[in-house]
Structure formats: structure tokens, C-alpha cells
Amino acid sequence: MKQNMITKKRITKETSVEISLDMSAVEPVEIETSVPFFNHLLTSMAFHGHFSLTVAASGDTDVDAHHVVEDTGLVFGDVLHELSLGRDSLARFGHAVIPMDEALSEVNLDVCGRSACVFEAAFPQQLVGTFDTALLKEFLLALAQRAKISLHAEIRRGDNSHHMAESMFKALGKALSAAYQEGTRKGLSTKGGIG
């Protein structure tokens, strides 16, 4: 499947975010959000999803990382939504279960044209370095809302919050890659269209 690179940009008084995605390529993967652990998670997502992703995000991280993380989710969702537009053949569903050491995460998604997000995780450490794990839910909610997908992410177990978050982002990458591939038949729903 040949995709063109899709790029979206959002600038507010709080943040500047630009994201480019190409599901048909594996390089480049270049992530700079000014939030080091978030860079690590997004890099893992793209690498294990086997897609090209560039993210340039900056903002008021002197306050905290919330706006940069959430707005990155919004823009990534916008990119994914554009990827789904005008497509009459799409795999639509994505699923992955990924371990990382003692941690295990599962992600399921449906490119259905309707936004829903369920995230279940019990992080034993609230902070990974200076990164607040509560921001992961904000990222996923923003992503699902703007991509118009049903997204279910569950971190089933783990003792180390770093491992838990990373296994979830690897699973997210795999699930996204599966869902946005070309489907084997025309039409995305028995209703005649998604939404």
C-alpha cells in the first residue's frame, strides 16, 4: 500500500505541534516534544508499528507537560482521521498484546468514525523521571476524539511504570498499523459507511 505523507500543524498560545505520518514507510522516526519520556514512548510506538512519524512539539512545559502531551494527541488524531477519509477499503480493526519484562499491555481499536476511549491502568509509580503517568490518559483521549476511533487500552499488569507505559505504546503502534492497512473488501461497515 502506498500512502502519501500526511502533515498537520496546530499552534495555540500554549503549544506548537507539527506531525507527519507515512504508514507506507518506516523512516524517518524523529520525535522532539521537549518531554523526554514522551519522546521515548512515541519513538517506540512508531518503531514497533513500522511507520514513519515525525513530531515537533513545544510549549509551556515550564508549567507542566500537560498541554504538549494533550495537543500532540489532538494533532496525531487529526492526521489519523485524514488518513481514513475517502477510503472504501480499510482493515479498520487493530489489536495487539505486548509484554515488556513484567508488564503486559493490550490495545484494541476500531476506525469507526465515532470517538470512544477506555483506558485502564494502575501505575505503581506516578512519575517516570519527571513525567506524570496521568498524562497518558489525556493523550489517548485526545487521540481517540480527533481520530474518531474507538480505542481501548489496558495495562494488564506491571511493577514498573516505565515498562508498563512503554509496553502500551508498543501495542498502540502495532494496533494502529494493523487498523489503517488496506482491507480485503470494499466497504467499511454493513451500514454502508462508518460514522
Image (cartoon, rainbow, N blue to C red):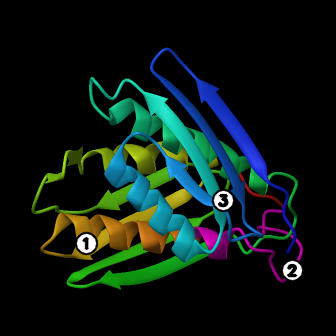
> What residue sits right under mark 3 in the picture?
112
On the question of residue 119 being in view, the answer is yes
> Reading the chain from its start, which is encountered first: label 2 or label 1?
1
Taking the spot 76% from the left edge, 67% from the top edge, the residue there is: 189
Q: Are marks 2 and 1 in contact (CB under 8 Å)?
A: no
The residue range painted magenta reads 176-192
In depth, the one of 185 and 96 nearer the eye is: 96
- 68 horizontally vs 48: left or right: left
The residue positioned 14% from the left and 52% from the top of the image is 126
Residue 174, image x, y percentages: 55, 75
* Mark-to-mark CA distance, 2 and 3: 16 Å
User: Toward the viewer: 107 or 63?
Assistant: 63
* Residue ID for mark 2: 185
In this picture, residue 86 sits left or right of residue 116: right
The amino acid sitting under disc 3 is: Cys
- Res. 146 visible in picture: no
Few, some or many residues within 10 Å of mark 2 (<14, 14–19, 20+): few
Measure the C-alpha gap from mark 1 to mark 3. 30 Å
Q: Which residue is mark 1?
A: 163
Q: Main secondary structure of the magenta part?
A: loop
Indicate the amino acid at tag 1: His
* Residue neighbourhood size for the residue with mark 1, other residues' Cα within 10 Å, grouped as few (<14), some (14–19), many (≥20): some
